[in-house]
Image: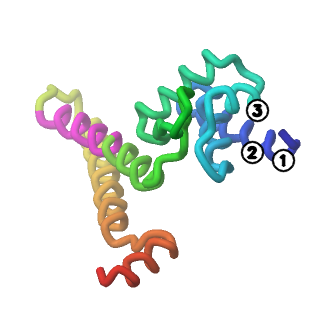
Amino acid sequence: MDPRTTRFTDRFAALFEDERQPPIAGRILALLLLSEGALSLDQLSEDLAVSKASASTNARLLAQLGLVEAVHQPGSRRDYYQVAADLFERSMAQRLARWRRFTEVIGEGRRTLPLPSREVDERLERYESAFSYMADAIGRAMVQWPGPPSRRLARVGSGR
């Protein structure tokens, strides 16, 4: 890989580490984002200088997270992966689900725990209110979001 591509994949690795995910998974996702088509596990392992087993484990993790998809090439028995077509929507839905679960846990705690003071209750109420508001606002924005220009053109062209 050229140095700019390496920097890009390394930055994705750091993002994944920040999220407590394997850095190799981040590097694979970055490489797939830059790819015009699906890449085999052999290609991923060679380009990233990792073992095929590591490429396989991390590609399957990304598939389980819904970020990439396994695809088959006619006449080949190799495993290929590509970025999920709706990567943005899937990743936002996962983040929103985490925020909503966090909000639910905070709210349940406020309703069911014997809180030691009004100060603690107000703190939890602020968190619950803020996360709930932001999750709802982002959820509404996602429903209203027209998508990238190619999608807007496809919708107009299809009569939708």
Residue at x 62% of width, y 28% of height: 41
Q: Amino acid at mark 2?
A: Phe
User: On the image, numbered disc 2 is attached to which residue?
Assistant: 8
User: On the image, numbered disc 1 is attached to which residue?
Assistant: 4
109 part of magenta stretch: yes
Residue at x 40% of width, y 74% of height: 146
Is 51 positioned to the left or the right of 136 in the image? right
3D distance between C-alphas at marks 2 and 1 = 6 Å
Is 8 positioned to the left or the right of 136 in the image? right
Q: Amino acid at mark 3?
A: Asp
Pick the residue in front: 67 or 95. Answer: 67
Q: Which mark is residue 47?
A: 3
Residue at x 48% of width, y 39% of height: 71
- Magenta stretch: give its range: 98-111
Is 36 positioned to the left or the right of 46 in the image? left
- The first of marks 3 and 1 along the sequence is 1
Is 130 positioned to the left or the right of 112 in the image? right
Secondary structure under badge 3? Answer: helix
Q: Residue 17 placed where, x, y %?
A: 61, 29
Secondary structure under badge 2? Answer: helix
Mark 2–mark 1 CB contact (< 8 Å) = yes
- The first of marks 2 and 3 along the sequence is 2
| Circle 1 crowding by C-alpha within 10 Å: few under 14, some 14–19, many from 20 | few
